[in-house]
Image (cartoon, helix red, strand yellow):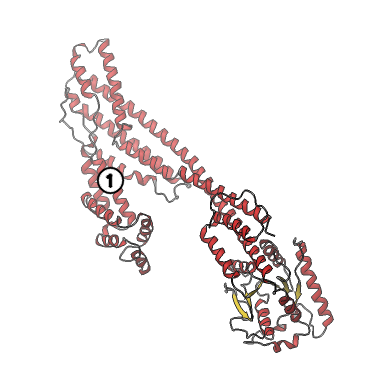
Amino acid sequence: MRHRTGHSRKAAPMTTWHDWAEKIDEQIWHIEGEPHVQQLRDLWHAFNTDPRTKITMWGVFNSGKSSLIRRLLAEDGTPVPESVRAGADRTQYETHVVASGDVDYIDTPGLDSGAPEHDRRADAAAALTDVLVVVTTPLLRQAEVRRITRMLTRSGHRYPDGSLHIVVNQLDEAGVDPRSDLAAYQELKETKRQTVVNALRAAGISEALPPVHTVCADAWRINSRRASPVAANYDASRSFDSITEFVAALHAGIHHRTPLRHASAVRHWTRAAQDAIDSAESQLAAQRELLESADDARRRIGVWREKLTAVAAACEARLRTIVHRELRAVMLAAERPSSDSDGARLQTALTTWHTQSLHELAQLASQFDADTDFGSAGRGSVSDSLAGTLDSVRSLGAAPRADLSSPMSSPTITRLVTLSDAAGPALRKSFESSFGFTVDRAASLIAGYDEAVGHIATDQRSGVFAILNRASTSGMPQFDRERLMSIPGTGPLMAYLERNPELGDPDNAAKIARRLKLTNRAAAAAPIVVGGIVEVARIMSENAHAQRTVQANAERDRMLAQLVDDVVAAETGAAGSTSPWITALNQVRAALDTHTASDDDRKKTAARIQVLLAAAEALSRLLAQPPR
């Protein structure tokens, strides 16, 4: 296609249908894409280059389309093929093409049979034909009238003289027997013809109406069971069935090929444009719903972020109070004899704070997961993302020991201990309990797995993972295995998973890798160092003789405030902090982010809405000014 940027601002009258169709397909491209437009062009090319005249039968289910084709073939002297059978088949989706001389009769699936695919194929055939024969029953239900008017409207009413015929078939079943009362039968035929004309006019068809024929293609279905009837088999009804007149009218209009094909082109692209407008409306509804859902989710996630901020602020304020209380107690106790409980008090206070604060964070995560609008969104549980960190904190609280390696200038300060002393062994033990193998074994498995995945192109990995997640390599269906092996680079990955069944599928491998990363990071975390505590001890030792002076008290309070700031910063937000609180807080924030559409996604959705609106509006303008 040549022009794929922007949209037509004004649909000026076209001098030829070619120019008009080019503008139509440009807008359809914006809605449906290149493959769809190419399919439309291929359909037109195949039709337009075929020298044979196409006469298509279109009508409701069980209206006698096949019986009419059998009669026309018999009148033409063409053998009736076995595939053209009288009697409807609701399961037949395809159109049947039957050649007779230089004409192809096309039998379409019956409309209103309960199968939407029937209607779609029949409507497409009605647009792409030289002559259309609309076949209806004597009942002429309102549903039939609506279907006929809709089809004519969606085809642009572009049926030149001789290219459209409406046939009321099966008149022999309308209640009057022509063999006993021919006059009453003829009166009935005229009544039915006028009924069709009035119904079409009432439905809004104001242009010149096509000829309406009242016939009985196979009176009393006498020939419905004949394998290949001939014209003589219909002689008994020829005097009243009006088929001879219909055949004459039908063939009179098919000798002017050029206007027929031009009209077919306009109908084909008009219908394609109408379908594209319908598709645009459907896509617009979906895109708007997506945008509204994303905006609503963003608003709701904003509320949850505010809750998270409130929890974090309350926990951090409580931490500041705890640290201030405990460090002040340590400072004031600097002159008295040392006690083994001095350092343990700060450690216990910090451990208790971590445990309580993370519990509150976990409660918030559970409340979020219970939210019906987010808990089933398929993006994973926020609580699950905290599980590893919560396990780590429980391990850190078990039997810590004092670290006496730092050269402290105060015996009390030297007994301060760290939370992370027991982290490494406890986290490794927790990992082994969860997965059944050691951290070292996991590191080896993941390294080999990443190497095997590296053989697969990045854009192919999601498809490969989806298949592997459905079934193990040992129990995989043959068609899935063959599909995988057709993708370059999958062989090493499948072989690696078969050799290492403990990895399971790609989802489980990703879970192992995430937990391994968390375990190693937490286990390697440096001990919590209370910044400035050595300096505080030095100052207090140097000023021991003046502890009760105003200057000493002011210095102590200043250093205490600085010390509290340093400890709180280390626990709640200092750059590079590996505090379990910071880890958990960041995990919850990241989990909330996964439930919020990115700005880029939202912009793409909004842009797509504008493209669809512009294309649909351009198509409407083009349809309002068809080619002459």
Quadrant assignment for the C terminus: bottom right
The quadrant in which residue 461 appears is: bottom left
Image side of residue 13 versus residue 379, left or right: right
Image side of residue 73 versus residue 173, left or right: left
Q: Tell me the residue that label 1 is attached to.
A: 517
Residue at 21% over, 31% down: 417
- Helix, strand or loop status at disc 1: helix
User: Residue 354 placed where, x, y %?
Assistant: 31, 35
Residue at 60% over, 77% down: 97
Query: For this rendering, which residue is in front, 3 or 324?
Result: 3
Residue 482 seen in the current view: yes
Please, is residue 356 above or below residue 442 in the view?
above
User: Residue 247 placed where, x, y %?
Assistant: 72, 79
Disc 1 residue type (three-letter)? Lys
The quadrant in which residue 48 appears is: bottom right
Residue furthest bottom in the image: 232
Please, is residue 72 above or below residue 455 in the view?
below
User: Residue 42 placed where, x, y %?
Assistant: 55, 66
Query: For this rendering, which residue is in front, 211 or 566?
Result: 211
Residue 59 seen in the current view: no
User: Residue 582 placed where, x, y %?
Assistant: 33, 36
Query: For this rendering, which residue is in front, 271 or 526?
Result: 271
Question: For mark 1, does the 10 Å Cα neighbourhood hold few (<14), some (14 to 19), or many (20 or more) residues?
Answer: few
Image side of residue 284 versus residue 510, left or right: right
